[in-house]
Image: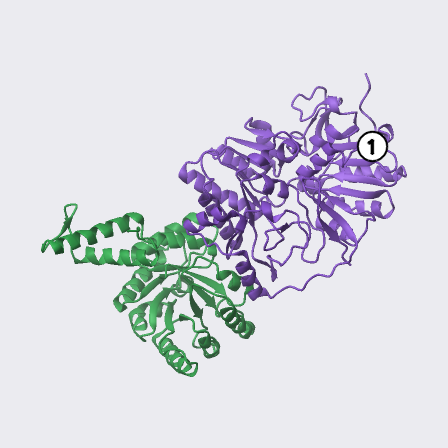
């Protein structure tokens, strides 16, 4: 029997046959506390490897050392579904010769299935694993809960290396994926910083505008006719998204509504709603806080799902297609309801789709919630800098000044008006913001394309230009 | 309707802007406590700019500086052209209200504002102010409300301000009495713990039970609780409608005395029913016929 346990990352790189030009993959469950991507790439640099492509489900600012590896040619390609603002700013300056490939969570899996993306070796940060490569995210000092985004890497990579912090004796029975998929195990002292693993944005906002919009969004959901027994729901971990969960919970408890499931990134708030009977189950592709991790470990109704089950457009079934309502954010939106979550007002990369376009496409009601102005910049622009999510999949926009419904959803607009909600054309909201803030100057970025945004069907939906 | 009145610091662009979408019946743009002496000019400019740019649906009240501050005349001169619904006099006295009313008359004339259009809300926040509440309420026809400022009052009374509000119970009652005797609104002091979601409900319920017409807020978080407490409840609306229907039926049948559910409907019950229905109509709470 082959001994899977190796003494070092370097040895794993050697034995998995990593060569110049290959693609290494990483999951992002350790979020902004991840050490593993940096560890592996530092080892690759020492070995003198060049021209590597990184396919990571997300890049955070803890991965800033990546920039030096790009500068020295160790890394020449980057594919991800999200990119933090500091790394994004450097990439926007044209650091990489090849365009960064941005996908959605669902699109990444679809492209792996199509063969338009490939992984040579997957390095899987593992809070806990045994010596044969059974892996769990639920246990250990750096427990992150669900390992939903790592499933596709494990299933699609030619070689898989587990990188556990907590190496336990064989067999680890409560595993997310098993030894059948894992080639090597390299134990390290630390896979990450628990403070960064747990998102810092899981507290409900106290901002009155955020709370006002959250109440409006909950009223919209109620008026849409979807908030009935069997209701399914997804919302993010940002303060305003959490406030929507509170507002929806209030209505569900007051009216005795028993929902079916909540999905996506799971927070303690959604766990609380599960425990209060608002939902029958949680379908968890990613845990946002320790309460979610604990619940996933202890409650059978809280179920880990793979990213493929969550959002793949090519899977035989995906949770996003059964979703009633999703709450999403935006940095910009245009009168056609196209949404930008990739670039900021200066055109600099500061985010990415994640599951944005997947859930918008699947959910029966995709709600964008965002303040009409941010720091004197209007939310609604003539044309978004970057199309992250196409307007045809977005149903409505909730701002503090009113609600704009996509003209493609005339029946929804009528329902909301009948319920007495303040519905107005998106152009009117745009005008209102411009009256207060003025019309922002059009950005003139360089012509060079530094990133391509791929929609979940694999087509290039937009490109991002270099910013000097 | 003045169920909820939200204080907005006159030197905060964000809060002045956000105020436009807050579910308050009135916005109190504060040029006094919230603004440092060396920023009074800037605050006046900011508030006038906000009033000219934003479409506020709420009643606008300008809290001007005290009559001994040297700022209040400039406050009125800058703000009268913006036609606020009312100005709030600080540490109100009969003399301060009269002075304010006189300057308002002058400035309204100079700025082509309908004479008497701008009301005065008298902030009562001293022991002497409480003692003279009725005189202040009737010092000018412009006075449309008495407003209790409990924090300063507690300091003047040399007592500790508590959540229960025992120390201001008499002042609250006295203020309501004076305001109602003068036929104007009585506005209760803000509840200052913005984290206490249950405390605000209890405090507003207490104020409502004493006869206040509304309550001020220093945080938008308190607005929905205040609005709810000071809105007619569904059961009160149903009862008021039944009272009015019984009275109409009695009138048609030529009855001198009308009863509802075995209880005689006397004049106070009829008056109260009318008040409830008037408020309900303004708030769109009446059932469709």
In the figure, the shade used to draw chain A is purple
Where, quadrant-wise, is the N terminus of chain A in this rendering?
top right
> Residue A290, position in %: x, y?
61, 36
Position of A71 with respect to B266 (left or right) is right
In the figure, the shade used to draw chain B is green
> Residue A311, position in %: x, y?
63, 36
The answer for which chain carries disc 1 is: A
Q: In the depicted view, which residue is nearer to us: A117 or A129?
A: A117
Q: In the figure, B41 relative to A159: above or below?
A: below
Number of labels in the image equals: 1
> Residue B159, position in %: x, y?
39, 60
Which residue shows up at 28% across the image and 47% down it? B235
**Whether residue A71 can be seen here:** yes
Which element is circle 1 on?
helix
Within 10 Å of the Cα at label 1, are there few (<14), some (14-19), or many (20+) other Cα atoms?
many
Q: In the depicted view, which residue is nearer to us: A176 or B9?
A: A176
* Location of mark 1 (residue): A9
Which residue shows up at 70% across the image and 32% down it? A150
> Residue A197, position in %: x, y?
67, 39
């Amino acid at each position: 029997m082959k001994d899977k346990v190796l003494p070092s990352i370097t040895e794993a790189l050697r034995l998995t046959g990593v060569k110049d030009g290959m693609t290494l993959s990483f999951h992002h469950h350790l979020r902004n506390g991840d050490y593993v991507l940096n560890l592996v790439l530092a080892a690759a640099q020492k070995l003198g490897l060049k021209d590597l492509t990184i396919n990571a489900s997300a890049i955070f600012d803890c991965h800033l050392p990546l920039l030096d590896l790009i500068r020295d040619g160790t890394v020449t390609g980057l594919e991800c579904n999200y990119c933090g603002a500091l790394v994004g700013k450097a990439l926007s300056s044209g650091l990489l010769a090849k365009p960064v490939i941005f996908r959605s969570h669902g699109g990444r899996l679809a492209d792996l299935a199509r063969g338009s993306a490939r992984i040579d070796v997957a390095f899987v940060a593992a809070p806990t694993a045994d010596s044969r490569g059974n892996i769990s995210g639920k246990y250990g000092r750096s427990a992150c809960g669900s390992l939903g985004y790592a499933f596709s890497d494990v299933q699609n990579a030619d070689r898989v290396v587990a990188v556990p912090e907590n190496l336990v004796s064989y067999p680890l029975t409560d595993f997310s994926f098993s030894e059948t998929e894992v080639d090597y195990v390299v134990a390290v002292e630390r896979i990450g910083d628990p403070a960064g693993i747990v998102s810092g944005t899981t507290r409900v906002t106290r901002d009155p505008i955020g709370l006002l919009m959250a109440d409006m969004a909950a009223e919209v959901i109620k008026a849409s006719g979807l908030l009935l027994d069997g209701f399914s729901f997804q919302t993010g971990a940002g303060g305003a998204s959490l406030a929507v969960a509170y507002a929806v919970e209030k209505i569900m408890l007051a009216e005795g509504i028993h929902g079916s499931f909540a999905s996506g990134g799971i927070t303690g708030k959604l766990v609380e709603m599960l425990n209060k009977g608002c939902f029958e189950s949680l379908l968890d592709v990613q845990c946002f806080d320790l309460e979610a991790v604990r619940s996933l470990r202890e409650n059978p109704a809280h179920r880990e799902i793979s990213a493929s089950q969550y959002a793949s457009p090519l899977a035989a079934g995906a949770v996003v297609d059964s979703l009633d309502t999703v709450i999403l954010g935006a940095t910009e939106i245009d009168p056609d309801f196209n949404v930008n979550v990739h670039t900021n007002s200066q055109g600099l990369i500061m985010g990415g789709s994640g599951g944005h376009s997947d859930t918008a496409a699947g959910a029966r009601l995709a709600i964008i919630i965002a303040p009409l102005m941010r720091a004197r910049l209007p939310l609604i622009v003539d044309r978004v800098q970057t199309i992250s999510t196409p307007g045809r999949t977005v149903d409505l926009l909730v701002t503090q000044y009113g609600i704009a419904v996509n003209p493609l959803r005339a029946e929804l607009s009528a329902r909301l008006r009948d319920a007495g909600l303040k519905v107005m054309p998106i152009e009117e909201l745009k005008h209102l913001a411009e009256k207060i803030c003025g019309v922002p100057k059009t950005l003139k970025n360089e012509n060079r394309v530094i990133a391509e945004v791929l929609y979940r069907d694999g087509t290039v939906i937009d490109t991002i230009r270099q910013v000097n | 309707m003045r169920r909820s009145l939200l204080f907005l610091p006159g030197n905060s662009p964000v809060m002045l802007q956000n105020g436009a979408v807050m579910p308050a019946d009135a916005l109190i743009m504060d040029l006094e406590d919230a603004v440092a002496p060396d920023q009074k000019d800037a605050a006046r400019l900011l508030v006038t700019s906000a009033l000219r740019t934003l479409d506020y649906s709420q009643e606008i009240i300008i809290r001007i500086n005290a009559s001994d501050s040297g700022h209040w005349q400039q406050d009125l001169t800058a703000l009268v052209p913006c036609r606020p619904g009312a100005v709030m006099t600080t540490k109100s006295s009969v003399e301060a209200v009269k002075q304010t009313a006189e300057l308002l008359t002058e400035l309204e004339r100079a700025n082509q504002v309908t004479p008497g259009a701008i009301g005065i809300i008298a902030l009562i926040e001293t022991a002497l102010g409480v003692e003279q509440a009725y005189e202040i309420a009737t010092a000018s026809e412009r006075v449309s409300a008495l407003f209790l400022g409990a924090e300063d009052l507690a300091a003047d009374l040399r007592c500790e301000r508590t959540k229960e509000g025992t120390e201001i119970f008499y002042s609250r009652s006295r203020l309501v009495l004076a305001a109602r005797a003068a036929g104007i609104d009585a506005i209760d002091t803000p509840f200052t713990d913005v984290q206490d979601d249950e405390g605000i409900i209890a405090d507003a319920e207490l104020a409502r039970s004493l006869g206040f017409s509304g309550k001020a807020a220093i945080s938008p978080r308190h607005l929905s609780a205040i609005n709810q407490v000071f809105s007619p409840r569904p059961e009160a609306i149903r009862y008021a409608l039944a009272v009015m229907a019984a009275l109409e039926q009695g009138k048609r049948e030529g009855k001198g005395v009308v009863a509802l559910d075995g209880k005689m409907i006397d004049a106070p019950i009829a008056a109260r029913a009318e008040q409830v229905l008037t408020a309900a109509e303004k708030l769109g709470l009446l059932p469709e016929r």
